[in-house]
Amino acid sequence: MKILEPILAWREEIAALRRDIHAHPELAFEEFRTADLVAQRLQDWGIDVDRGLGGTGVVGIIKGKQAGPRAVGLRADLDALPMQEINTFAHASQHGGKMHACGHDGHTAMLLGAARYLVAQHRDFAGTVYVIFQPAEEGGGGAKRMIDDGLFTRFPMDAVFGMHNWPGMRAGQFGVTAGPIMASANEFVIRITGKGTHAGMPHLGVDPVMTAVQLAQSLQTIITRNRAPLEAAVLSITQIHTGSADNVVPNDAEMRGTVRTFTLETLDLIERRMEEIARHTCAAMNCDLEFEFMRNYPPTINHAAETAFAVEVMRDIVGQDNVFDKVTPTMGAEDFAFMLQEKPGCYVWIGNGSGDHRDAGHGAGPCMLHNGSYDFNDELIPLGATYWSQLALKWLAQPAAPQTAA
């Protein structure tokens, strides 16, 4: 494993920053302390900083000593989750109901390590590296907010890269695949209005409960009969709320859930068929319908050329046997997808291990993402920072793309 020596020398200092961030988690668009810490460290290292994109976003601008035609973006996320940490080690969350249970504290630390290295090498490269610290990944769409605020117009870059720790994959390993690597995330709400009545006289009312039951069954036929069998998709009804008494047919029922796909075409199909089936089912049962479908995050789709480039960088650091370049995509979602819709790039997973790294006092649960017993593996910081640094330097060292005549 080829870890850059200066980064190894800073490992304890950067790990201490990570643990400080972990102990002071902040939710989406509230990352004021975290953003201050990041901006201050970048400035201490002589890096120009721009703040405020997406509300609490931070962008560090690292220009090489030589003018160069290329620019690249490296992105980490800042926010924590609204959940209770059950770890009791020294750096556990000091804020009840808030926890870095997804490792964004570690992502921030790895990118800070890379930024420091790029400056410590006296910027002996041509071009520009933008280190992007994004707010509100956990459901807030912070990536889109930064883009809407001018991320790619104010900081023009040829490509953008992201990385996420991955529990269950051994520390020292990377995983990636070209094409979809994470799914779209979408929510739906179906409100069914009938006519309440005495449960002993159902003929005098219109039953929204039986309508919801029939609709729940019918919606699954979209997956089994409308979707192409080789197109992965999930339609999960996760909530049905109706009724308040055993002897009353209620007035209404509400159904909620999520849809996940790897392509927008499949998502279009599912949304269209859901509304059609819901409307016709409610009409057949004499109920009224309100249908809402919210598209939150698009699928995260890696670009082929940038994925191949990232794979070669990873192989050079950890060896071919520790880079899995055709991992099975996950139905989890990631708002880095918005950036990949705007710019070519690649999103990779870095192994976080199985949890043996955790300090005494960790919770009894598994070291999995979004779990109260989770903690980021500080052993990854030098590796992740090395990957970011080498990726940026090798990207900038490529020959400039030929200009096409107008």
Image (cartoon, grey):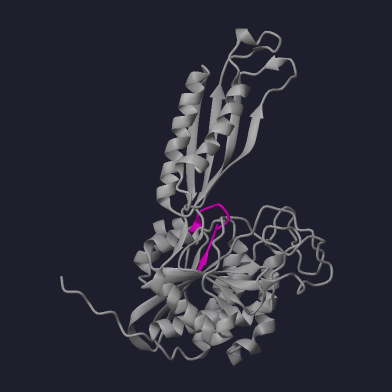
Q: What residue sits 41% from the left and 68% below the top?
A: 303
Tell whether position 262 is magenta: no
**As displayed, is residue 304 above or below residue 245?**
below
Residue placed at 16% from the left, 74% from the top? 405
Measured along the vertical axis of the image, is residue 1 above or below residue 284? below
Quadrant position of residue 151: bottom left
**Image coordinates for residue 292, horizontal then vertical, percent:** 49, 35
Q: Which residues are magenta?
A: 132-143
Which quarter of the rendering shows the N terminus?
A: bottom right
Q: In the rendering, at what x and y percent does residue 101 appear?
A: 68, 61
Q: Quadrant of the C terminus?
A: bottom left
Residue 309 picture location, percent across and down: 43, 78
Q: Is residue 397 above or below residue 195?
A: below
Examine the rendered structure and indicate whether residue 402 appears above or below residue 349.
Answer: below
The residue at 81%/66% (across/down) is 362
Q: In the depicted view, which residue is nearer to us: 342 or 92?
A: 342
- In screen coordinates, is 208 left or right of 132? right
Q: Is residue 136 magenta?
A: yes
Q: Position of residue 12 (x, y in %)?
A: 70, 83
